Image (tube, rainbow, N blue to C red):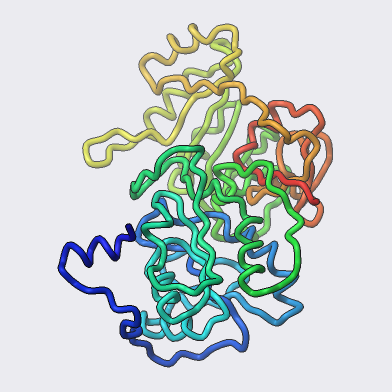
Amino acid sequence: MHLVEVYANSSGVKLDKNPVEPYYKFAPLPEKYITINPSSGMESKNYDHYGLVMDFLMPFFEKMGISFVQLGLPKDPYLPGCIDFRYLELEQSNYVVKNALMHLGNDSVMGHVAGKYGTPTCILFGPTYANVCKPYYHTENSIFIESHRNGNRASHSRSENPKTINLINPEDVASAVLKILNIDEEIKYKSIHIGKDFSNPVVEIIPDFDVAGGYKGFPFVVRMDLHFNEENLARILNSRKAGIITNKPININLLRALKQNVAFIDYEVDSAKSCDIEFVKFLNKEFSLIDGGKRISLYKVSCRDSAEDVGDLKLLLFDYEPLKLKEKIEQPPEIRYKRLRTNSPLLSKGEEYASDWHWKHSYPLEDGESFTPTNPEQDFLSFINNFYIYEVK
C-alpha cells in the first residue's frame, strides 16, 4: 500500500482522483529543458552520480537544444552544466517543473509536484521502497529506479555508509531519461566500478612546481612523500588550506607559522627506526585540539600492515596517537585494463594524473580519462575509491 493511502486511511480522508494542483508563481523559463533536483530532506536519498548522468546525456541534449535546470536550495551543491534555479521560491520552482519536458531527481517533494502536474518523472530510490514512496500521481511513461541494495531491505535511515542509492548505475538513469523523452539513442557506457569517494573531489599536489591559483574550492592535499620541497609547501599553505602527506619530518617552524592553513598531517613511516619520535611529539602537541571536551587530532602516524616491526612502532607511539595501519587493497573484479575517470587528480609540473602509478609511469590524463593497468599495483589500488572505471560498448 502506498504511503498516501496509509495516511488517508488513518485520517479518514477519501483520496481524490483529480485533486487541486499545487500553487505556482511565474518564473522565467528556458526554451526546452528538464529539471533535476539532486537534493532531498535525507542525505541517504541523495544520488551522488548525477554528474555522470549529465555527461552521458549532454551529447544528445546539445544536438536537440535541451538544457538542464537545477532546482533545490541555495545551500545544495551546484551541478556544473545546469542552469541554476536553486534560488527560486517553492511556488516558482513548481512553475518550472510544471513546464518541463520531464523531471529527474531523488525521492523528494519536487518529484511529487511534477507527478501531480503531469510532468513525466524519473525518480531514484535507495533507502526507501519505490512502490510505497513514488509519486502517487504520475504519468504512464514515468520511470522509478530502485537500488538493488545488494539484496538487503530498505533501511529508511537518514544516513547510510555506503549509500545504497549509489548502487544505481548512471547509465541506467541516463537510458531512462532518453526513454521518457522518446530519444532513440543508446548510452554506450557500462559501469564497472564507482569508488565511494568519486563524488568527493580532492586535488593532490606533488610540490615539484609553483602551483597557480586553479582548483579553487577543492580540498588540497600536498604529497610531500612523493617530492619533499618545503619551499613549495610554504607557498601552497600561504595561499590556501591543505592537508599534508609526508614520510619525512617537516620544519616545525614552517608548520607552526602556517598552522591555521594545515587541514591535517599524515606522517607515513616504514619502521620504528625511521619514525622520528620528536616530530611525533611536536605533532601531538601542536596539532591536537579540544572541542566540546573531546580531543581531536589533526595528525596521524601510519604505515603498511606489512611492516616488519609493527609491534615496535605501536609501542613507540603508545603515549601518542595509535598507529594507523594501511591494509593491502584487493583488486575489484573486472577492472583490468579498463577506462577510468577521477575527480581527484594528482598534479605534477602542471600535468594531471589519475594516481601514483600513472605518475610514476608517465601516463597523464588525456581529456579527463586514463586506464587501469593490466596488473594493478598498490600504488594504483590505493586510489581505487576515487575512480569511476568503465568500458565503452
* Residue sitting at x 46%, y 90%: 27
* Residue sitting at x 30%, y 33%: 295
- Quick check: 358 above or below 282? below
Horizontal placement of 378 versus 363: left or right? left
Query: Is 370 or 96 nearer to us in this picture?
Result: 96
- Quick check: 144 above or below 314? below
Question: What x and y, as percent, mark residue 378?
Answer: 69, 26
Question: What x and y, as percent, mark residue 155?
Answer: 36, 44
Query: Is 199 or 113 nearer to us in this picture?
Result: 113
* Residue sitting at x 52%, y 31%: 266
The number of numbered badges drawn on the structure is: 0
Question: What x and y, as percent, mark residue 44?
Answer: 41, 51
Q: Is residue 213 visible from the viewing direction of this image?
A: no
- Quick check: 195 above or below 382? below
Horizontal placement of 36 versus 232: left or right? left
Query: Is 277 or 53 nearer to us in this picture?
Result: 53
Q: Quadrant of the N terminus?
A: bottom left
Q: Is residue 376 visible from the viewing direction of this image?
A: yes
Horizontal placement of 239 versus 188: left or right? left
* Residue sitting at x 68%, y 47%: 191
